[in-house]
Image: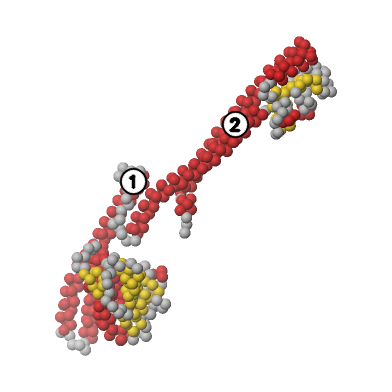
Amino acid sequence: MESKLARIVKTFTFRLALVYVGLFSLSVILLFVFIYTFEMNQLKTQVSDAIKMQYNYLIDEYKQSGTAGVEARIKELIADDDEGNEIYLMVNQKYEKLAGNINAWPTEAVKEVPFEKEGSWVHFRMEGRNLPLGNVNQDLTVRAITIPLSKWRFLLVGQSLQASQRVQQTIIQTFWGSLMMTLVMAFIGAIIMSRGFSRRINIINRSAHTIMHGNLSVRIPFNKDGDEFDELSSNLNLMLDRIEMLLGSLSQFANNIAHDLRSPLNRIINRLDAGLRTIEKDNPAHKLLDKNIREMRDLINTFNSILNISELEANTEFHTFETCDLQAIIGNLVEFYEPYAAEKNVALASDIAAPVDVYGEKNLLTQALANLIDNALKFTPEGGHIVISCERAEGSLDMIIADSGPGIPQEYRNKVFEKFFRLEQSRNTKGNGLGLSLAAAIARIHNATITLEDNHPGLRVRLSFPQSAGTS
Ligand SMILES: Nc1ncnc2c1ncn2[C@@H]1O[C@H](COP(=O)(O)OP(=O)(O)OP(=O)(O)O)[C@@H](O)[C@H]1O
Ligand SMILES: [Mg+2]
């Protein structure tokens, strides 16, 4: 079975929520890119400004006091640098150290030292332990400016970018943390939102399901002055009201026709009957008239069945319920159908040994069981057998009519309960396709169900009464 989460993931709302997660994550990414670029530029400018200040200071010193002055200033500056970020180096024309806190002129800087007043910027990496800060294990990037003070003196002033690297790392870590949080929160939000929507949709679906299964009076629950789901439910309910009304008037119309046609048909039959009595039996007109009268009686029976079913479907309460013994009813029916069965060479037997009491309407129960036995007898070919039995399971009491006939294919087992539906194979037998509809309407009144099963070969009709309806 599909898990609850899998069902949520498949919903439209969840997919919509995921789109929002994507957009939200994108905005988090853009925000961080902006913060990152801004902050990095800011730090770079700060470092450059600081380096330029010291570098100008040292150039002035060189102009005033020469190499010795610069050496002294460099020492002072190093001593003042508490954090150990600043880097100074003065070398001679052979790039040999004269003063400073790193030992060698960085190779990256050699090529980039044209004799320029403004100096040129260089970036290079150094092993942390070669830097004045000492105990740093990783390599650090250094930003520095180099300038030839004269033909024999070159100066390098720089700063390790440790601080900005730390800020950079913090921003990146915060970014991943926030992105993760955003994703988790958005995912949880998506599930909560989808569950909310699914719950509302399920209410509508459940009602639709009940309605589809024949209970057109069910309505979708909703709150007045509610949200758009309530508005949808209210509109669907109005639509159902209209459909129910139209169906009602349609079936009323059909019933009226059936009802109104019965009297004229009866009058015609009576007249034909009277005419028939005046005709000699060996007259061919007698046979013709007799056949017409019989067909008209069948027509009246069909009308009666339609009216019966409609009446049963419309009624929900019966006041004539009493305890009925199904064993006795079936015994009588078997006795009644026995001659037909014998004529057709079909074995008809009841396997019910003890009384089976059910609370219901005796005539209706007899009618339903008669229809089922009639079908079994009608569709079971010669030499076949029909057994009627009773099964008691927890919560139900089942009457089973099992025959050895052609059975009903699985795909038609619901359809045969529709009015006038008959299988292709049964077209040449007598009947209108109303027997099972009537039996089903009677079963519904008794809270019972009729299920069609395979009897291998043949059909097993199970008329199942809930145990509360079955006593004994
Ligand atoms: N025991 C059965 N074996 C095989 N097919 C059956 C059996 N019972 C019903 N059917 C099929 O279901 C159809 C509907 O049955 P239903 O009792 O409603 O109508 P009917 O028997 O054809 O006519 P009516 O009952 O109105 O005389 C039948 O036409 C037949 O095709
Ligand atoms: Mg029938």
Residue furthest front in the image: 135
Residue 244 visible in this rendered orientation of the protein: yes
Q: Secondary structure at mark 1?
A: helix
Q: Which residue is mark 1?
A: 231
Q: Nearer the viewer, residue 328 or 354?
A: 354
Of callouts 2 and 1, the N-terminal one = 2
- Tell me if mark 2 has few (under 14), some (14-19) or many (20+) residues whose alpha carbon lies within 10 angstroms of its own: some
Residue furthest bottom in the image: 282
* Vertical relation: 199 (above or below) 74: below
Residue 299 visible in this rendered orientation of the protein: no
* Vertical relation: 401 (above or below) 83: below
Pointer 2 and pointer 1: residues touching (CB < 8 Å)?
no
In the picture, the quarter occupied by the C terminus is: bottom left
Image location of residue 364, percent across then percent down = 24, 71
Name the kind of residue labelled 1 in the image.
Answer: Glu
The residue located at (35%, 77%) in the rendering is 402
Distance between the alpha carbons at the discs numbered 2 and 1: 48 Å
Residue 132's disc number: none
Quadrant of the rendered image containing residue 67: top right
* Vertical relation: 124 (above or below) 59: below
